[in-house]
Amino acid sequence: MSTQATKQVVNQEERRRSQRLLLDVTVIVRGESTQREQFDEITFTISVSAHGALVVSATSVSLGQKLTLQNQQTLDEIEGRVARLGAAHGGLTQVGIEFARPAPQFWSVTSPPASWNR
């Protein structure tokens, strides 16, 4: 990796409010699709942080849209908004969901990173 590319990766990581963890958690995502239909989708996370998650979704959603996530291990629920949409691949889209407020306890991580306690 070039020095410039390394600087860009480091700068991006430093800008994050809390460290991401690669963690596969089964969640139910609830909301309204872009077709204005209510949905409940069982899916999983790719990565999580105190401020949100990256999930895979078969349902079409839009940026800024409010969604509810339910952690299937704890049955806890939290509201968030769509902050990022990845490219669709095989009928699935990566959806970045940002929580309305930090919620490190939502993921039930036994040893969360120090950045989750800020």
Image (cartoon, rainbow, N blue to C red):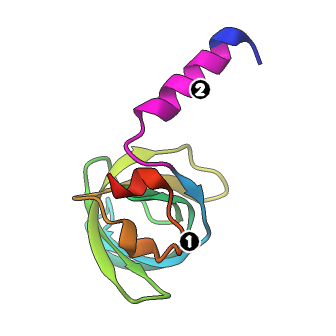
Residue at left offset 37%, top offset 43%: 17
Return the disc, 2 or 1, that comes first in the chain's sequence. 2
* Residue picked out by circle 1: 44
Which quadrant of the figure contains the N terminus? top right
SS at mark 1 in the image: strand
Residue at left offset 56%, top offset 71%: 44
Q: Amino acid at mark 2?
A: Val
> Could you tell me residue 22's position as x and y percent?
62, 58
Residue at left offset 53%, top offset 75%: 110
SS at mark 2 in the image: helix
Residue nearer the viewer, 77 or 84: 77
Q: Amino acid at mark 1?
A: Phe
Give me the C-alpha separation between circle 2 and circle 1. Answer: 26 Å
Within 10 Å of disc 1 (Cα), the crowding (few <14, some 14-19, many 20+) is many
* Residue picked out by circle 2: 9
Residue 8 part of the magenta-drawn span? yes
Residue 34 part of the magenta-drawn span? no
Q: Is residue 96 visible?
A: no
Residue nearer the viewer, 84 or 36: 84
> Could you tell me residue 55's position as x and y percent?
51, 61
Q: Is residue 4 left or right of residue 107?
A: right
Q: How many marks?
A: 2
Residue nearer the viewer, 37 or 85: 85
Residue nearer the viewer, 91 or 20: 20
| Magenta highlight: main SS | helix
**Magenta-tinted stretch:** 5-19
Residue at left offset 50%, top offset 23%: 11
